[in-house]
């Protein structure tokens, strides 16, 4: 069987996946898109030679990316999902009955099309009437939208050092804050606590310059190098550690217990931020 | 304004993601005044806590010549580093930072009289030497001070060899130690230098064997030594991976343990290893040309205003600001801005084609760049900024 070797730039390990079948290889305006099938993980979406999701384990990432902020918020109505052209995050957001509107901002339309065709289970929500798709740069969307009426902003981007960098700047975070309601929440992935600890700290620091409340939780993602994946969460008033609704949705991994234990213990968090974690 | 850069996997082996993130963040503005040298504080901090960590009884003295920027020195001083200096100019900077004299040594075997007078006033007490005249100079200006003799050792495998200019062989080294004692100096130890950017692990083996021979010879003459200064030479990554500091230090530590008495004070003088890979030189493309079949790329930093070491064979890695997915790469001759035909940084460099005015990041540019630079031809020396 041929193998696919992942080329994640900032990973000290290199993953190799058996390839049962190559279903799609194409170049969009922004990146190279591949779809392959692996005997264990099933269908896999690969952007610029970095694995974005697999059919088998995508729910870990998508559930943990979305449900923490949506349960910490008392009543999310309007949600913006930036990136995540596969639709996985949107599918999870739509599980919340309170959600009336999802702005789905993706820069690369080709990812949406590929996902519709090869990952119907992931992209199932994107044609829901509550979803408004906008093909544009998420940074621009946030900058231009000046009303503070969004309850949650969820970033589902590719790696930080790359063309997703515009979603990790001070200006962007400020624009997000200006679009959020007082009870609003913001979440973004910040790579692995094993391999990219300095990046995790760096993003926390940048966010702290913008938001009064900044925190960190993690989830185990088998197919992202470093596995122990960190999510940065920020808000204006509400602590994201607390659940303000009882989970009433169907999930495979996320639940109220997971919500609470996903956050780093406060002592560990403090040590991390003081750069005192010796790994 | 978000700039896009063509970052590839091999860059990741040279510069940490978080350093790059900070650098790019700094550069996200319409006008970046180049050339500038951006130094990552956290990388410097990481290197200072790494160097000397695996060698027992070690003290680390930063070789100021690598990058004498006062903000860097202030930061290192705060981190508790010692300093190795060679001249009155370097001492002047340290004195304005009020660095304690106990934290300063001088390993330049041939010191100016002016420096010795200043060092005497300041209270510096550790000096290297490798000639009889130097013994007389030191004995006269700073009587009773501690001195260590510079032994010549092989420099093969280092990219910037130093042994030819300095160092003496065993017999002469012994005579010098005896002479220093006779002149009422305190001959306390031995130093050597395996050569800067040394990628040959065995240079330390040979050097330590030789030092041990001298140590024993001195003991027979009733000179009891207590300090072993192992110089610098720790390499950093420019284009290809080098042996790690951990590996070098584990090796050196076990060699010292086997050969030298317990409690021997070890001095280390890294320069490049402290600041080199914490620095990214930000330059601009000022011109492009095709000459015969060669593609030429002109930057606002060249041999004279920052990249002097390229003449000695150091090859740098470059990150080019370019449009999304610039995949058409070309082979370039990279040159500096001056009118001198000697001002060529590198040849046969494969890079995506930048536009005039685009930025080019030169990785591992924190050491022996601005400290060598001149304003020849009116081109400015990169300003150093800690980020």
Image: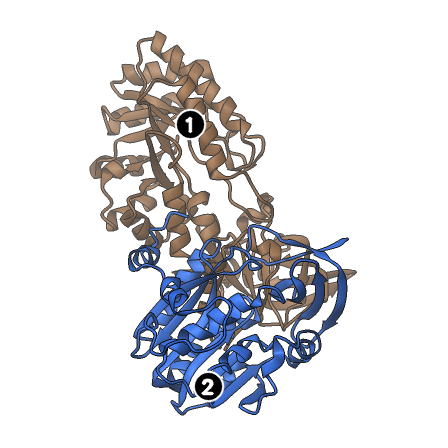
Chain colours: A blue, B brown
Q: Nearer the viewer, residue B38 or A151?
A: A151
- State whether residue A13 is above or below residue B180: below
Separation (CA) of disc 2 from disc 1:
65 Å
- State whether residue B382 is above or below residue B103: below
**A34 to the left or right of B386:** right
Q: Can you tell which quarter of the image residue B385 is in?
A: bottom left
Secondary structure type for disc 2: loop
Secondary structure type for disc 1: helix
- Residue at screen point 51% across, 77% down: A92
> In the rendered image, is residue A7 in sight?
yes
Badge 1: how crowded within 10 Å, few (<14), some, or many (20+)? some
- State whether residue A77 is above or below residue A162: below
Q: Which residue is mark 1?
A: B253
Q: Which mark is residue A257?
A: none
The percent coordinates of residue B169 (x first, y second) are 48, 18
Q: Nearer the viewer, residue B228 or A100?
A: A100
The percent coordinates of residue B294 (x first, y second) are 75, 59
Q: Which mark is residue A97?
A: 2
**A191 to the left or right of B139:** right
- Residue at screen point 74% across, 69% down: A25
């Amino acid at each position: 069987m041929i193998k696919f070797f992942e080329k994640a730039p900032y990973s000290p390990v290199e993953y190799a996946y058996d390839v049962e079948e190559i279903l799609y290889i194409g170049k969009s305006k922004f990146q190279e898109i591949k779809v392959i099938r692996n005997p264990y993980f099933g269908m896999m979406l690969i952007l610029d030679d970095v694995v974005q999701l697999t059919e088998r384990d995508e729910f870990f990432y998508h559930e943990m990316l979305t449900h923490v902020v949506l349960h910490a918020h008392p009543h999310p109505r309007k949600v913006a999902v930036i990136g995540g052209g596969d639709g996985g995050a949107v599918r999870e957001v739509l599980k919340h009955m309170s959600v009336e509107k999802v702005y789905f901002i993706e820069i690369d339309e080709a990812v949406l099309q590929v996902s519709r065709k090869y990952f119907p289970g992931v992209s199932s929500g994107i044609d829901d009437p509550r979803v408004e798709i906008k093909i544009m740069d998420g940074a621009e969307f946030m900058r231009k939208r000046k009303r503070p009426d969004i309850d949650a902003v969820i970033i589902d981007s590719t790696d930080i050092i790359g063309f997703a960098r515009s979603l990790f700047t001070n200006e962007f975070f400020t624009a997000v804050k200006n679009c959020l309601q007082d009870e609003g929440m913001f979440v973004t992935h910040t790579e692995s606590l094993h391999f990219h600890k300095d990046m995790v700290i760096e993003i926390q620091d940048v966010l702290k310059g913008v938001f009064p409340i900044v925190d960190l939780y993690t989830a185990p993602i088998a197919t992202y190098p470093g596995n122990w994946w960190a999510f940065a969460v920020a808000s204006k008033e509400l602590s994201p550690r607390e659940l303000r609704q009882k989970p009433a949705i169907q999930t495979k991994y996320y639940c109220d217990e997971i919500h609470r234990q996903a956050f780093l213990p406060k002592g560990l968090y403090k040590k991390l931020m003081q750069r005192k974690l010796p790994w | 304004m978000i700039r896009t850069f063509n970052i590839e996997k091999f860059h990741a082996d040279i510069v940490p993601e978080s350093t790059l993130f900070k650098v790019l963040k700094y550069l996200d503005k319409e006008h970046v005044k180049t050339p500038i040298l951006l130094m990552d504080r956290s990388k410097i901090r990481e290197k200072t806590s790494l160097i000397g960590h695996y060698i027992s009884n070690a003290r680390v003295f930063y070789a100021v010549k690598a990058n004498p920027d006062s903000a860097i020195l202030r930061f290192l001083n705060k981190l508790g580093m010692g300093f190795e200096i060679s001249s009155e100019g370097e001492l002047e900077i340290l004195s304005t930072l009020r660095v304690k004299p106990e934290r300063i040594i001088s390993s330049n075997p041939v010191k100016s009289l002016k420096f010795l007078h200043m060092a005497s006033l300041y209270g510096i007490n550790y000096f290297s030497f490798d000639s009889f005249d130097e013994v007389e100079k030191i004995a006269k200006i700073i009587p009773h001070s501690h001195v260590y003799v510079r032994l010549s050792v092989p420099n093969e495998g280092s990219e910037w060899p130093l042994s030819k200019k300095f160092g003496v062989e065993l017999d002469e080294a012994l005579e010098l130690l005896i002479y220093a004692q006779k002149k009422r100096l305190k001959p306390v130890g031995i130093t050597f230098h395996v050569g800067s950017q040394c990628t040959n692990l065995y240079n330390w083996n040979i050097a330590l064997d030789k030092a041990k021979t001298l140590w024993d010879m001195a003991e027979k003459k009733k000179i009891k030594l207590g300090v072993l200064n192992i110089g610098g030479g720790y390499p950093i990554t420019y284009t290809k991976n080098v042996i790690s500091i951990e590996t070098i230090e584990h090796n050196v530590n076990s060699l010292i343990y086997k050969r030298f008495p317990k409690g021997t004070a070890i001095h280390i003088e890294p320069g490049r290893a402290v600041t080199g890979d914490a620095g990214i030189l930000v330059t601009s493309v000022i011109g492009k040309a095709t000459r015969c079949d060669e593609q030429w790329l002109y930057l606002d930093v060249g041999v004279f205003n920052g990249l002097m070491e390229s003449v000695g064979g150091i090859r740098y890695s470059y990150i080019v600001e370019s449009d999304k997915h610039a995949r058409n790469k070309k082979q370039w001759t990279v040159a500096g801005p001056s009118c001198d035909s000697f001002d060529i940084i590198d040849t046969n460099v494969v890079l995506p084609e930048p536009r005039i005015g685009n930025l080019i990041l030169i990785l591992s540019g924190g050491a022996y760049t601005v400290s060598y630079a001149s304003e020849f031809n009116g081109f400015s020396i990169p300003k150093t900024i800690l980020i």
